[in-house]
Image (cartoon, rainbow, N blue to C red):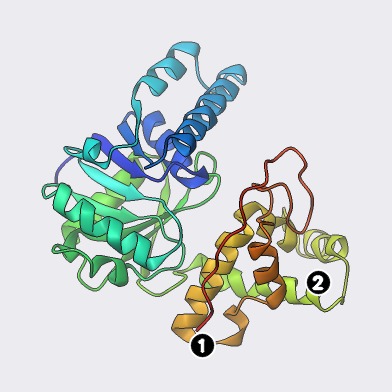
Amino acid sequence: MSEIEVLGVVGGGFMGSGIAESAARAGLTVVIHEPEAAPLERSRERIEASVAKATRAGKLTAEEGEAMLGRLTWTTELEDLRGVDAVVEAIIEDAKAKGSLFKKLDALLPDAVFLASNTSSIPIAEIAAWTRRPDRVIGVHFFSPVPVMTLVEIVRAIDTSDATLAAADALAARMRKHPVHTADRAGFIVNMLLVPYLMAAIRMFEDGFATREDIDEGMKQGCGHPMGPLTLCDFIGLDVMYAIGVSLYDEFKKPEYAPPPLLKRMVVSGHFGRKSGRGFYEYPQAPKPAAAKVPAAA
């Protein structure tokens, strides 16, 4: 099995930046790609701020922080990924966008150990079908915030090889993550269980059954959850929640996975949660992005 020393990360958003930071902290050289300069600069600022915070807290020495940042490269050119040992994709939750990217990566990186998707709900086989080497495509689903959360779901598609699976496990171990293996079904383990619960909380709020605060406090005080469901939706991102719900409903046609109408209205209005400044709660420190286009549930 080939050793992974240089990792490509496609997508410099919250998840992609977290994956890149964790990989660099584990000693890997990381190349982060975004096609536009603005999100790439935000990725750089996000990671630099995180490293500075860890240094102030004594979790990293100044020398370790400097060395870690030195292992990171940001680029707008996909071509600059040529020569990396493996890639983790963390772009928008859209099957066609991911498939198109994997087709390009497959041609660009014929010798890569694996091409991995950080998707939280899209079947890996659907992404792998865009490539000529589906045996080296795998799901490596990290959890947010990546530098803090230790879990990673390793998702084996129908054509994923034993060598690819072993390499993904090795990367997870190198990054000090705890891997769990799951079959290739939309939602995998965690979201298959979590999404119906979160959608039920949104429906409860939508129907006026209880206030947002009482719904959240009920689960915190009554079930010992560290975060209430509506707060958790805001933290995940309502656009991400909607995309996951659509993907799960499309695959299983079960009503508990379908996004409630309120969720769609919030997403098309640009209310994505914590990252936009407004979701079920208000977060005035965050900038408001442009409203999103959302797919229709099947």
Q: Tell whether 5 sits left or right of 270.
A: left
Which residue type does callout 1 highlight? Lys
- Location of residue 293 (image quadrant): bottom right
Which x, y percent locates residue 169?
Answer: 30, 51
Q: Depth check: give the residue in front, 104 or 162.
A: 104
Which residue type does callout 2 highlight? Phe
Q: Tell whether 124 sits left or right of 40.
A: left
Q: Does 106 sit above or below residue 295?
A: above
Q: Can residue 255 be seen at all in this image of the molecule?
A: yes
Q: Helix, strand, or loop for circle 1?
A: loop
Q: Disc 2 or 1, which lies upstream in sequence?
A: 2
Label number found at residue 200: none
Label number found at residue 253: 1
- How far is disc 2 from disc 1 in space, using C-alphas? 23 Å
Which x, y percent locates residue 59?
Answer: 54, 23
Q: Depth check: give the residue in front, 144 or 93.
A: 93
Q: Tell whether 165 sits left or right of 293.
A: left
Q: Does 91 sit above or below residue 9?
A: below
The residue that appears at 73% across and 71% down in the rendered structure is 202
Q: Residue furthest left?
A: 111
Q: Residue furthest top?
A: 63
Q: Helix, strand, or loop for circle 2?
A: helix
The residue that appears at 31% across and 34% down in the rendered structure is 31
- Location of residue 81 (image quadrant): top left
Which x, y percent locates residue 217?
Answer: 84, 60
Per the image, the residue denoted by label 2 is 205
Binning the other alpha carbons within 10 Å of mark 2 as few (below 14), some (14 to 19) or many (20 upward) gives some
Q: Does 63 sit above or below residue 39?
A: above
The residue that appears at 67% across and 60% down in the rendered structure is 233
Q: Can residue 198 be seen at all in this image of the molecule?
A: no
Which x, y percent locates residue 116?
Answer: 30, 54
